[in-house]
Image (cartoon, rainbow, N blue to C red):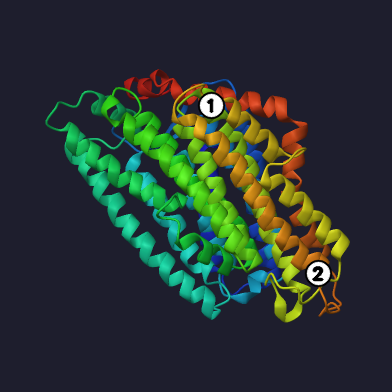
Amino acid sequence: MNHLLILPVLIPLFMGAILLIAHRMGKPAKRVLSLLATFALIPVAACLLLQAGDDQLRVYALGNWQPPFGIILLLDRLSALMLLLTSVLASLSLIYASRGDDERGPNFHSLFQFQLLGINGAFLTGDLFNLFVFFEILLISSYVLLVHGNTGERVKAGMHYVVLNLLGSSFFLIGVGMLYGLTGTLNMADLAIKVGQADADTAPLIAAAAYFLLVVFALKAAILPLYFWLPRAYSAACAPVAALFAIMTKVGLYAIIRVFTLIFGGAANELAYLTHDLLWWLAGLTIVAGVFGALAARQLQVLLAYLVVVSVGTLLAGYALGNAESLAAALYYLVHSTLVAGGLFLLADLISRQRGDAQGALLQQAAVQQPLLLGGLFFIGCISVAGLPPFSGFLGKVMLLRAVLDEGQAQLLWPILLVGGFGLIIALSRAGSALFWAGQQAPAVTQKADPVRLLATVGLLSGSVVLVIAAQPISAYMQATAEQLMNLQPYLAIVRGGEA
């Protein structure tokens, strides 16, 4: 059995427990232990990515109980990709946090590790109930991380976030319970077989369970009309937490791709409307809502939060188009949007620190101390996130538009993306003018950006450049990932003898 597969779960689990038990140790020791554990995830995830490159599915059966009876972890190209993306984002976010943001509240580092435990577990699990368990772990950690610092705005945003996600967890449990009652299993591969064999009496109930799950995943992913919690929560969180949260919506999108491709994407043809037509319209409306929110934003952090909403709609559109090329383009765009959004949240904090009382307000009130440096980074991030050449956002959108079929409603994606991109250019241009060009007062502070914080910010934003330089091998990996996801037979073979 490949024990490397369980390390992304064990490392943050044990380190989080150690940091929680030894909470009285000094802050430097906590930072070192937390950083070591997070950095260790990068080579582990890289090794798993190399292993997944042979297109073989790898199964880790906990307690050696073979599927479908036991709990399993499943490694394929998609889960390996998400693990590596999470480890890179988390490492740079934690470097930023270790320059003082972790001192605003207790047990930051243990909560950070438990957050990684929930995220990594959600990407690896092959069992629907354990997807619920890992969702709860990451949500409980995010509840506390969101209010880290205990400002009034964060507590208020946290209350809304907690209530909505508790409601979502209830729906998740109802959907899981219905599927277990109807099929007698929660192993995803086994569920795919049982759902495909469902008779006419149970098919409507299975569809109802699928709707419950879709509502839950749409809430986690911030899809219209369930996205209203995201701008307030992301804009209120401290910068490194908001940067880590850039992967949180991707967990919901990952769950949609995994569950509705594997469990409901094979023989369950009656759910085709659910997974394609309905999601397509929701994707388009989410993009439109995100663009209007960005145009109306009066705070930099709120503007960036709406950019996350736009990226969610774009990714969902790639999945809803229903072909391997569009899914590959969506996965490429997923990596781009996660890294750039995380970098922009860190950059927004650097800018706010140099504007005194104005902070992130988009007002022509205060200039920054380092306009050329921070303004240049902001310009690069804006070009990338708006989808302009020569950065990765442009390549991702081109790949997605090339995957649009010649006929049908999918052609609406062209005007939605292009007009939406123009709207983002307007919103970001206005923000840049207010922050770097039209400032009327001298800088409120004289302290320059912390070099370590700046390094972490540049590290995330440079991901857009890396995606362009290595576009050919990365896009080839995404194409192979999409084709693997759409070939269900190896997944179904899991319940017929372990590894496919």
Front in this rendered view, residue 460 or 59? 460
Front in this rendered view, residue 286 or 304? 286
Front in this rendered view, residue 48 or 379? 379
Amino acid type shown at disc 2: Ala
The answer to whether one can see residue 347 in this image is: no
Measured as percent of width and height from the top left, residue 315 is found at 53, 40
Q: How many marks?
A: 2
Measured as percent of width and height from the top left, residue 471 is found at 72, 29
Q: Which residue is mark 2?
A: 438
Residue located farthest toward the left when viewing the structure as drawn: 201
The answer to whether one can see residue 439 in this image is: yes
Measured as percent of width and height from the top left, residue 19 is found at 57, 64
Q: Secondary structure at mark 1?
A: loop
Q: Residue at x 56, y 79 (%)?
A: 151
Q: Secondary structure at mark 2?
A: loop
Which badge, 1 or 2, comes first in the chain's sequence? Answer: 1
Amino acid type shown at disc 1: Val
Q: Which residue is mark 1?
A: 404
Residue 430's disc is: none
